[in-house]
């Protein structure tokens, strides 16, 4: 889609780094909007619209806030900056443990990739059984970019089993049942993201999907050969 | 083995609940010992001996200490006590979130089961390639209980691939590579424990091993049928 692309005024401290831009079609009427395709979901499933924005643009951060755990949730493109620039934002990357530094770097992605991920996840969400039909102004640009939105065409990225639109709102032991997942864990772009069951996402770990499938094939070969002693 | 079984004096606040007992043979000479079979490992691989004692007897606790996270590492048999009794030990179980309460209860096990798990894990450790040969006073009772100690007979409980004795000392991103695992996650007894790769243990999650294998079989069926759209 040919986008408006105009800069949107923002009070975020990070806007001086990468200002938010408008993703409405060029020559649109009315106000510029960074996430026009999320407006419909924001009305009917606000938690999901928020999740898509957050997962597309933010690092996951630590489970708890502490000086050695590093910043809790930060824009992925901010992490692309050099140590010097990060310090200006109050992030002293050198003071973090090597483990946390590596985790943060793993989550880095460009602004454009993050915007693409948000569109892709929105498109995926509408393909889940039970999802509402998107209005035309949402459907048309998403289908032009990613193909037809068909109910049931979105399955768990990892186990390939279907899940229901209601599952987006479900939690188990305090954790969302459906998460954003990556076919290759350290590549945050449209070709590489989807939704997955939390249990599947955890099982995949830091493997690529291909590595994961190869690994579980090997496990089953071992089990079927009767290796080990249980 | 017919054990001495005498109570061993302890300064632990929990000893009034279940006093530690001697696991040397009945009629032994010298001092009583709760973990005589761990003495050899304690000399040559102290981190592993400590790990076996800790995993056999303690809950995993939270990754961080906080009032809502609950007690960080506590003896598994203490959790079997009623709320009243726990309060006497400074653990106000009702003040913890239902999620943390459930996690703690999942880890509960009797003193006898925990002692059995420590023996079983010790036996398993000697069956890993690269493990030292246990001295006879260790080998004989362990083999009487669990069968011959053969180098290479211990594999990852979950993926059934071998790992090396050196792997017990290895860590990746700050986490031990080899963990204690359970074929059925909420049963902490000799028939049900073993060592596993951390990645395998995480992938198994709260499933039993049978459920886990069934689950990954289904994933591969979906993948091979070409379900989903990656």
Image (cartoon, coloured by chain):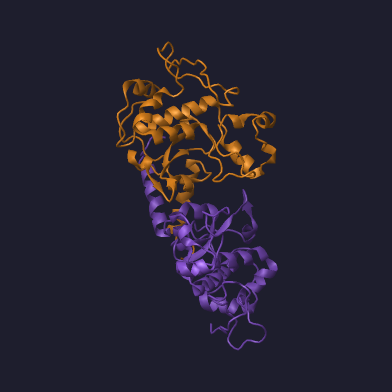
Chain colours: A purple, B orange
Quarter where residue B223 is shown = bottom left
Residue B168 sits above or below residue B221 on the image: above
| Towards the viewer: A187 or A105 | A105
| Towards the viewer: A81 or A215 | A81
Quarter where residue B180 is shown = top left
Q: Residue furthest top?
A: B27
The answer to whether any part of residue B164 appears in the image is: no
Q: What residue is drawn where x is 60% and y is 32%?
A: B79
The answer to whether any part of residue B33 appears in the image is: yes
* Total numbered labels: 0
Quarter where residue B128 is shown = top left
| Towards the viewer: B168 or A126 | B168
Q: Quadrant of the N terminus of chain B?
A: top left
Please state the horizontal and vertical placement of residue B73, each as a whole percent of the image.
55, 37
Q: What residue is drawn where x is 52% and y is 59%?
A: A156
Please state the horizontal and vertical placement of residue B147, each as a whole percent of the image.
37, 26
Please state the horizontal and vertical placement of residue A2, each as a whole percent of the image.
54, 85
Please state the horizontal and vertical placement of residue B121, each as a whole percent of the image.
42, 32
Q: What residue is drawn where x is 60% and y is 22%?
A: B16
Residue B206 sits above or below residue B55 on the image: below
On the picture, is B135 further left or further right than B53? left
Q: What residue is drawn where x is 44% and y is 46%?
A: B175
Q: Residue furthest bottom?
A: A27
């Amino acid at each position: 889609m040919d986008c408006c692309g105009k800069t949107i005024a923002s009070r975020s401290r990070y806007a001086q780094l990468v200002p938010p831009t408008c993703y409405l079609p060029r020559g649109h009427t009315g106000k510029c909007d960074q996430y026009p395709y999320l407006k419909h979901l924001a009305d009917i499933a606000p938690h999901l619209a928020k999740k898509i924005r957050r997962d597309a643009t933010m690092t996951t951060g630590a489970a708890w806030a502490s000086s050695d755990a590093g910043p809790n949730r930060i824009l992925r493109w901010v992490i692309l900056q050099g140590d010097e620039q990060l310090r200006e934002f109050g992030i002293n990357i050198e003071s973090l443990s090597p483990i946390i530094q590596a985790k943060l770097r793993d989550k880095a992605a460009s602004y454009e990739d993050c915007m693409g991920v948000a569109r892709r996840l929105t498109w995926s969400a509408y393909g889940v059984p039970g999802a509402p039909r998107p209005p035309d102004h949402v459907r048309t640009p998403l289908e032009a970019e990613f193909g037809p939105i068909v109910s049931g065409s979105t399955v768990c990225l990892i186990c390939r089993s279907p899940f229901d639109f209601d599952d987006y709102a479900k939690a188990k032991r305090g954790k969302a049942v459906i998460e954003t997942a990556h076919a290759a864990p350290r590549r945050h772009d449209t070709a590489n993201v989807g939704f997955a069951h939390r249990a599947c996402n955890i099982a995949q770990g830091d493997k690529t999907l291909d590595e994961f499938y190869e690994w579980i094939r090997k496990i089953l070969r071992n089990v079927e050969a009767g290796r080990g002693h249980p």
